[in-house]
Image (cartoon, rainbow, N blue to C red):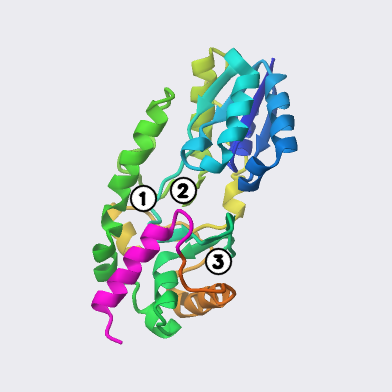
Amino acid sequence: MKIGVLGNCQAHGVAQCIRLLAPQVEVVSRSVALTDGDKPEVITALAAEMAACDLALIQTLEEVQPRLTGLFETALAKSGSRARRWPPVIFRGFHPDCVYVMRDGLAMDGIVGPYHSALLCAAWAEGLAPERAAGLFNAFAYAALGYFDAFDEAVALLEPRTRRHGFDLSAFLNVPAAPFMHTVNHPRVEILQSVAVQALDLAGIARSPTAPLPEDELAQGPVWPAYPELAQRGGWAPTPASWSLSDIGAVARQAYEALDKLEDRSLGEGPGEQAIQRARDFIRTHVVR
């Protein structure tokens, strides 16, 4: 039997878990970039590859990346009854300040990889010095920006997205002891294993009742910190991250250097727009110039 796994950066981890859970099957994984939605040759090739599989596990990225709708619709149409959907794990509850800055549909480099701080983006856009921006990281700002409510809001978004396709991640969402996300869209491998287990069970494919975890490859990329005040409120144990708030002064300067490459200060494109605008409103209201 041959299983195809198509999705974003989470696809390879799910495929690796399937290989360990069901070593009797052949697994092909393909991850897509946002720009692939504009490439007819890529769409055709991916759709054909999924159609050649006995089971095509296709992620529902159209819900969060409309630019990829054509790609996934084509893959679904070619795969027909062999296609099953699986949900993207996107969760801002641990990292509500972590955003993308987009230009012409592409993510701009930030503090680590493509990730930026909404607070630092807002401070830069409002003309605050990096030293002043570093002082914004406190419980008062987090409360005003709704960061303390972010976990419950993220749960309310993720649960219906997963249940719609028959998946259940409530075991992770119920009072987690530590963040189960490295960034807003990079889950820990334990989450991906749960997705793989449920995908096999839903498809009626025999699997081992237990299997070792593969290497957590997404942990090798950027890891955003859970800010101490948020972690304390949520009861989350500290986990290693790519940067620390103890170095926020240097991080602020690094963030500004990345943003200085932009031609304007609008920051009005992409999924981080609302968080950045909310932070700009906070600065205008509460920060003395």
Give the amino acid type for the residue marked by disc 3 in the picture: Gly
User: Which of pointers 3 and 2 lies earlier in the amino acid sequence?
Assistant: 3
- 161 shown above or below 105: above
The C terminus lies in quadrant = bottom left
Percent position (x, y) of residue 77?
61, 21
Image: magenta residue range: 268-289
Please state which of the two labelled residues, at mark 3 or mark 1, is closer to the viewer: 3
Secondary structure state at the residue bearing disc 2 = strand
Left or right: 208 in relation to 153: right
Label count reads 3
The N terminus lies in quadrant = top right
Name the residue that disc number 2 marks. 181
Name the residue that disc number 1 marks. 93
Q: Nearer the viewer, residue 161 or 204?
A: 161
Q: Nearer the viewer, residue 191 or 73?
A: 73
Left or right: 258 in relation to 29: left
Give the amino acid type for the residue marked by disc 1 in the picture: Gly
Secondary structure state at the residue bearing disc 3 = loop
- 92 shown above or below 160: below
Percent position (x, y) of residue 212?
58, 32
Crowd class of label 1 (few under 14; some 14 to 19; many from 20; radius 10 Å): many
Q: CA distance from mark 3 to mark 2?
A: 19 Å
